[in-house]
Image (tube, grey):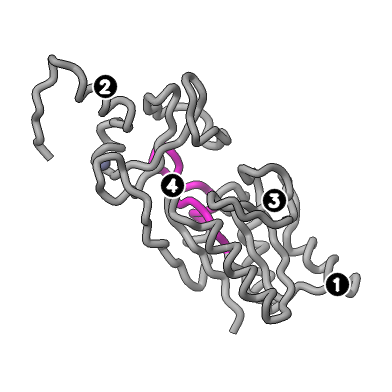
Amino acid sequence: MPELVFFSGTMDCGKSTLALQIEHNRSARGLVGMIFTRNDRAGEGKLSSRLGLVTDAVEVGDGADLYAYLVDHLSQGRRADYVIADEAQFLAPEQIDQLARVVDDLELDVYAFGITTDFRSRLFPGSQRLVELADRVEVLQVEALCWCGARATHNARTVGGVMVVEGAQVVVGDVTGSADEIGYEVLCRRHHRRRMTAATAHAAALSPDVLPVSSG
Ligand SMILES: [Zn+2]
């Protein structure tokens, strides 16, 4: 039975690397994938991983109908044996419904990869719809760590290293983070709640006014 699988996690949990690996393994077996993405860090029409691997993909625009796109593709006699949707948190809920229809009506496996929650720790609409519709949700076990060493489970948005909790849900930032640019950092829940990023924790540690309290 074909499946809609949602591989979810935080920013640095290796989702795109896994997406590329699935693509590689299946193409090695002669299967052809349809790869959708949106707002990848490598630019339009690319699926890239932090490790530097990249492949071509179809950039999903606002209002694009993914089911219709596949029907059109197949009716031209072109192949698609399975579907990968990376950065699926950026897809509209309707587009997730279209992916479910691809599974049910076209009988293709769909592997969606996405960040679960935004920088305010709220579900992205696309991720919420995936949780609602997916046959299976795989939470990627995060190797990413907070600056304190705990498992990083939350995404923070930073401006100049300082965590912010207001602003548009989607701002594609520079995760390498220079001075006043918007960046992203993964934190444990405790430090997300306290809004302590690596930069602010470092500054606090250097301040002689701060006692080295380790109250959890
Ligand atoms: Zn922490």
Q: Which residue is mark 3?
A: 46
Q: Secondary structure at mark 2?
A: helix
Q: Residue furthest right?
A: 76
Bounds of the magenta span?
Answer: 112-129
Residues under labels 3 and 2: Cα distance?
37 Å
Q: Which mark is residue 78?
A: 1
Q: Which residue is mark 4?
A: 117
Mark 2 crowdedness (10 Å alpha carbons): few <14, some 14-19, many ≥20: few
Mark 4 crowdedness (10 Å alpha carbons): few <14, some 14-19, many ≥20: many
Mark 1 crowdedness (10 Å alpha carbons): few <14, some 14-19, many ≥20: few
Q: Is residue 25 above or below residue 88?
A: below
Q: Nearer the viewer, mark 4 or mark 2?
A: 2
State yes or no: discs 3 and 2 in contact (Cβ < 8 Å). no
In primary-sequence order, the first of circles 1 and 4 is 1
In primary-sequence order, the first of circles 4 and 2 is 4
Q: Residue furthest front?
A: 52
Residue 83 in picture, x, y percent from top left: 67, 68
Which residue: 55% across, 56% down?
A: 16
